[in-house]
Image (cartoon, rainbow, N blue to C red):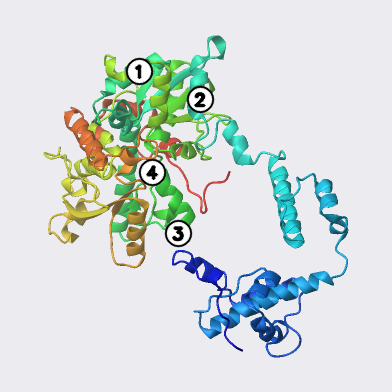
Amino acid sequence: PPPVTPTKAHRLSKRRAPLQQKRFLIEPSTRYEAFAARGFHTGTPGHGIGIERSVPRALRLSDRAQASRSRLPSPPGHLPSSRRQDCARTAAAAIMISMKMRHAAPAPAARSRGLVAFRHSVGLPKPPTGLPARRADRVVTRVAEAEAKAAAAAAPKPAPAAAKKKAAGGGKDGGHAAIVAEELAKVGDERKLCVISIAPAVRVAIAEAYGLVPGAVKTGQLVTGLRKLGFDKVFDTLLGADLTIMEEGMELLHRLTDHLEGHPHDNEPMPMFTSCCPGWIAMVEKSYPEMIPYLSTCKSPQMMMGAVIKNFFAHDAGVEPNRVLSCSLMPCVRKQSEADRPDGNTAAADGRDVDHVVTTVEMAAMLADAGIDLTTLEESEFDDPLGTGSGGAQLFGTTGGVMEAALRTVVELVEGNPMGKVVFEEVRGLEGIKEATLTVTPCKESPLHKYVAEGPAGGGLQLRIAVANGLGNAKKLVTALKAGEAKYDFIEVMACPGGCIGGGGQPRSADKQILQKRQAAMYSIDERKQLRRSHNNPIIQALYKKWLEEPNSHLAHELLHTSYFAGGPPE
């Protein structure tokens, strides 16, 4: 066929040329399928009366006639001949559609009444004027579909289980701060004994809500502010962290001893992973269920603190556990889901050890609403008997801190002598993955003493440790372990970058060095502590003597240890 000569109207500018050409770049296969789906005969290329046979006719049309009849502009003349052929096919298809519609069978009932009647039947406004009949009909149909979807979305639906749980105060992130504020405002018989415990990472980040550097607001000022807000007792979660170290440290020694004896239990393999981070636990349960036996069974400091409050403290205070409102001030948005786990109700079948979790940001907002400025307050002490924690427990809020706190206790218990150095630089810092090998020399009273001769260092046992922060780094570590490329005895994992100091409930900051500053504040608090080892905490010693008997006892397992679920805990 002869080439199509472009008209003046189609000598397009450089800016519009690509857009104009794009209208013709339709794949032939897609075009044929579209027409066939609409019931139009496309014909076999080169046969029958179809689009292909109409190509010569379209090519013979003048530019103006083609633009008028197909309602498409003629293709620019500078296109290759094969491209003009495709454009002509598109124009011919449009002509055939127009001819087909002129002789089509009667339309469905809604359309046979005309667009006006159809518009009236669905209650829609009249479509824009100046459109072809088929396109106007399509506009009305699409608007009707949109209106139907909007009506379906607006219709009342039964609330899902998660929404009911959230409305009842048991959701992951649904208004727990508001519920706590309502409880604090109650008076008389309706009011419960309201207690709150403060996590390590919160005390260094709360200052950022006032535009100050991390650690500028003293812990004692935060304690005073919480009392002014209405809490009856303010406890220190560091006590729960010290309790975690005692249970987790003894569990590590138990597993290590079994392996050195050559007959490890099937349900307690090595290495042992820490279990205080709910984000890490969720990843193992859902993505690596085969790794569940490697997790420590110890609860997190928050949940151990909740068990102590609802059992030990409530008993000594002469208050029923369900009359104690136990709250946690946490840097993590996942801590509420941790409190919702099935074994989070050791005190009463119808209660919970931790009733509500409030994040750092939420607490800053609550204090601001109450007109409390922490920077202007005097310092005060935590309430007894659950207000004493060690410097090692303070390090729980940063990556490597759980490992360092555990080593301070485990190494001393194994060697039988006080450590001259309590700082383990090997596990400090913000690197994604840190690893080290420590040599431990067991004393004669230690059950590990008989394995000293077998140690590769000739007089000591090698303890291989690793620390990972961020789930991406945790996945790398797990992959290396499963491939046999790495071997460790004890591994700490935290889901958030930098650990709890980078938790989702912490204040947002544009400072790229904010994690370094928060971590430095954590180390500073640890250095100022006179008590720096968990096993030296007098409150911990009293708890075991009066209540728990010894680490990993039967009662300790019932109250302070947990279980895990492949795929996640049941709703």
Residue position marked by numbered label 3 in the rendering: 290
Q: In front here: 168 or 427?
A: 168
Q: Is residue 308 left or right of residue 342?
A: left
| Three-letter code for the amino acid on which mark 4 is drawn | Cys
Q: Secondary structure at mark 1?
A: helix
Label 3: how many residues lie within 10 Å, few (<14), some (14-19) or many (20+)?
A: few
Residue position marked by numbered label 4 in the rendering: 277
Q: Identify the residue at the far top of this view.
A: 188
Q: Position of residue 53 (x, y in %)?
A: 71, 86
Pointers 3 and 1 in contact (CB under 8 A)? no
Q: Position of residue 342 (x, y in %)?
A: 53, 40
| Three-letter code for the amino acid on which mark 1 is drawn | Gly
Residue 532 at least partly seen: no
Residue position marked by numbered label 1 in the rendering: 225
Residue position marked by numbered label 2 in the rendering: 178
For image coordinates 71% across by 54% down, the residue present is 142
**Separation of marks 2 and 4 at Cα, in angstroms:** 25 Å
Q: Within the image, what quadrant is residue 537 found in?
A: top left
Q: Position of residue 221 (x, y in %)?
A: 29, 19
The answer to which of marks 4 and 3 sits earlier in the sequence is 4
**Separation of marks 2 and 3 at Cα, in angstroms:** 39 Å
The answer to which of marks 2 and 3 sits earlier in the sequence is 2
